[in-house]
Image (tube, rainbow, N blue to C red):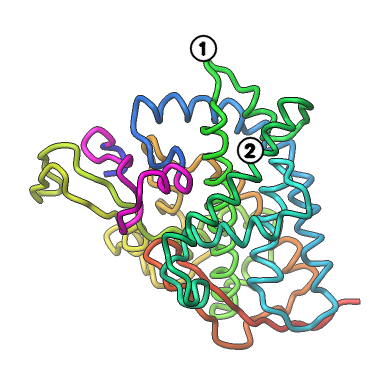
Amino acid sequence: MTKRHADFLSGEGIVMESMPQELLDAAQGFIAMDPPRHTKVRRLLSSAFTPKQISRINDQIRANAKRVVDDIAGKGEVDFVSEVSALLPMHNIFDMMGVPEQVRRRAAYEAQFAGGWNDPELMGDQEVLPRLFEAMGYLREVAGDLIEKRRANPGSDLLTSLVQAEVDGERLSDDDIISFFGLLTVAGNDTTRQSTSHAMKALTDFPDQRVWLMEDFESRIKGAVEEMVRWATPIMTFRRTAARDCELNGQQITEGDKVVMFYASANWDTDVFTEPEKFDLARHPNPHVSFGGGGIHHCLGNQLARQQLAALWRELLHRLPDIEVCGEPSYTVSTFFHGVNHLPVKFTPAS
C-alpha cells in the first residue's frame, strides 16, 4: 500500500484520529501531502537534505553522543529516556537546523504533543486540540524567526539550505519550511528516541546479543542498527484514505475509506521473518519497514537515524559496558509512536 499513492492518499491525515486541516499542515508537513504538491516539496527538500549534508554533520553526531554519555557517566543510575535517548536526537536535529541552545528543550518538549495526545502522563487535564495548536504555534514561531535570520544572514546549516533550495526555478515557501521544521522536530526527535530506548531494553533482555555485538563492534553495528529499528518500530501506524474504489489483497476498498498500515505487524510477520519475536542483531536479510517500506513517503532522514544510533551505542557500550535496565519501563499511550516515557538504567560509574 505504501507504493500505491494514487489509490491511497495521505492528504487527509496520516494518524488514526481525524484532525483539523490547519493542524495537519502544521504538524505533519509534506508526509501528509499527495502529488503533485508532495513531489515538488520533496524534490526541494531532498536537494538540501542530501547524503553530503548528513556526512557534514557526522563529526557533530559523534560529539553529541560523547556529550550525552559524558553527562551521565559518573552518576551510576539515570532515567535513560530523559538523560540519553531524548537528548541525542534533540541536539543533532537542532544542530542541523541551527536552533539556539536556549530554545531547544522547550521546542523538543512541545514536539512531544504531536504524537502523544493520547498519553495521560503528557496531557494531564489539558484539552487535546487547544494544546496541540499551542505546541505547533510555538514551533512555528521558532521556525519563522530562524527563517528570517537565515535570509538576512545565511549560515552553513540545513535551514539555510532550505531557504536557498531551488529546483527548476522554484523555491520553498516559508510555510513549506516551517512545516518541515515541525516535522523534523517531531519525527526526527521521536523516532530515534524510541529506537534507542527500545534497543536498551532489548540489550538487557537479550544479553547474548550485546556480547555478540561487542566481539566485533565496528563490523557488526551497521546490521545491528537495522535490527534495533525493526525491534522498536518507532512509528507503529500510518493512515491513508482511499482515492477511489479499489482492491487490496483481495479486500474491496471503497472510495473515502480510511485504511491503516500497521508497521509493527509487518515487522513481526512470520512469513517474512524467522523468529521475529527474537532480538537478533545478526538478522540477515532484514527487510523491515520501519522507514516506510518504500514509495514516495519513504523516510527522508533514514540515514541520519542510522548514524545517530551507531554513534550513541559506540559511546555507551564502550564506556559504560555494564549499563542495563534496572526497573520497569513506562510506555507512551499512543496509536502512532511506540514510545517509552521512562526507562531506569544502572551502570558502574566511570571516572
Which residue position holds label 1? Answer: 168
The label on residue 144 is 2
Of marks 2 and 1, which one's residue comes earlier in the chain? 2
Q: Position of residue 209 (x, y in %)?
A: 58, 72
Q: Is residue 342 above or below residue 231?
A: below
Q: Out of 33 and 60, give the one closest to the viewer.
A: 33
Indicate the quadrant where residue 342 lies: bottom right
Please name which of the two marks, 2 or 1, marks the residue nearer to the observer. Answer: 2
Q: Is residue 16 magenta?
A: yes
- Residue range (magenta): 5-28
Image position of 293 (left or right of 325): left
Indicate the quadrant where residue 1 lies: top left
| Residue plotted at (15% across, 46% down) | 248
Q: Is residue 285 above or below residue 168?
A: below
Q: Out of 205 and 32, give the one closest to the viewer.
A: 32
Question: Dot 1, how many residues are within 10 Å of its Cα: few (below 14), some (14-19), or many (20+)?
Answer: few
- What is the spatial separation of the Cα atoms under label 2 and label 1, in whole angstroms? 25 Å
Q: Position of residue 252 (x, y in %)?
A: 8, 48
